[in-house]
Image (cartoon, helix red, strand yellow):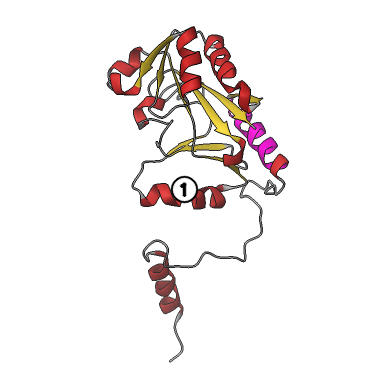
Amino acid sequence: MTPSAKDEVLARVRSALAAPGTHHPRTDSPPTAVSGIPTPTERTEVVDLFAERVADYRAVVERVGRAGVAQAVVAALAAHSAESVVVPEGLDDGWVAAIGAATRVVHERDVSNAQLDGVDAVVSTAAVGMAVPGTIVLDHGPGQGRRALTLVPDCHVCVVDAEQVVPDVPEGVARLRGSVDAGRALTWISGPSATSDIELERVEGVHGPRTLHVLIFE
C-alpha cells in the first residue's frame, strides 16, 4: 500500500521525536543563515564577523592577545566603575590576582544569589561563540559559574577564546552536545539584557546585565 500524506507526516514527527543522537541531520541545506548573511568559512572571517555582530547588540567588544587578557579585564572593569567583582570557580588564577589588585573580589562560593545584587560586576569565560547570530553561550562549567552569577550583577565582562568561535548555530549546538548530555544549563547571550516598554523605548538591564563587555583573545 502506498503511504498517504498523513503517514508521511507522522513518520517525520516520529523521527523528530526520536531520542537525541538517533536521527541523522539534513545535509541538503546551503551554508546560509536565516538572516541572509552567508556563513563565513575562513577562521579570520569567522572571528571578525562574531566581533561585528556582538558589537551590533550594543556590547563593548575588544580583541586582545592572550598575554594581555588580565590587563584588559582590569581595564574593562575600571571603565565601568566596578568597585566589586564576583569571580566564578575555575577562572584563571592570574586574572583573579590582577582583578584583586585593582578592586574588591568576591568569590562565587562566598556569595548567595540575594547578595549578588550588591556586586557591581562579574567576569567569566564562555563555552561557545556563534558568528552569524553574534551569540555567546555559557554552559556554566569552570570559569563561568552558576547562572545567577552572570545574570544579576549590572556588568558582565565575558572573555571568549577565538578558538571557541564557530560560524553558525548548528556548529555551535554540536559543540554543546557534551554539556547537554552532562545536564548543564545553557545561557545564550546576544548583547546586554534589553527590552522595550509600551512606548517602544529601549530599556536595558531588565532581566540581566545592563552592560556586556566582551574580550576576544587570540
Q: Which residues are magenta?
A: 45-58
Q: Which residue is painted at 37% across and 52% down in the image?
A: 181
Question: Which amino acid, mark 1?
Answer: Leu
State the image coordinates of residue 200 (x, y, percent, origin top left): 51, 25
Q: Quadrant of the C terminus?
A: top right
Does 204 lie within the magenta span?
Answer: no
Circle 1 SS class: loop
Using the image as rendered, state which of residue 195 and residue 17 is in the foreground. Answer: 17
Does 57 lie within the magenta span?
Answer: yes
Q: Look at the magenta stretch and give its main secondary structure.
A: helix
Using the image as rendered, state which of residue 27 and residue 217 is in the foreground. Answer: 217
Using the image as rendered, state which of residue 205 and residue 127 is in the foreground. Answer: 127
Q: Is residue 42 above or below residue 160?
A: below
State the image coordinates of residue 108 (x, y, percent, origin top left): 34, 23
Which of the 4 quarters of the picture holds residue 145? top left
Which of the 4 quarters of the picture holds residue 62? top right
Q: Which residue is painted at 60% across and 40% down in the image?
A: 163
Q: Is residue 8 above or below residue 209?
A: below
Count of numbered circles on the image: 1
Label 1 Cα crowd, 10 Å radius (few <14 / some 14-19 / many 20+): some
Query: Which residue is most to the bottom?
Result: 1
In this picture, residue 170 sits left or right of residue 8: right
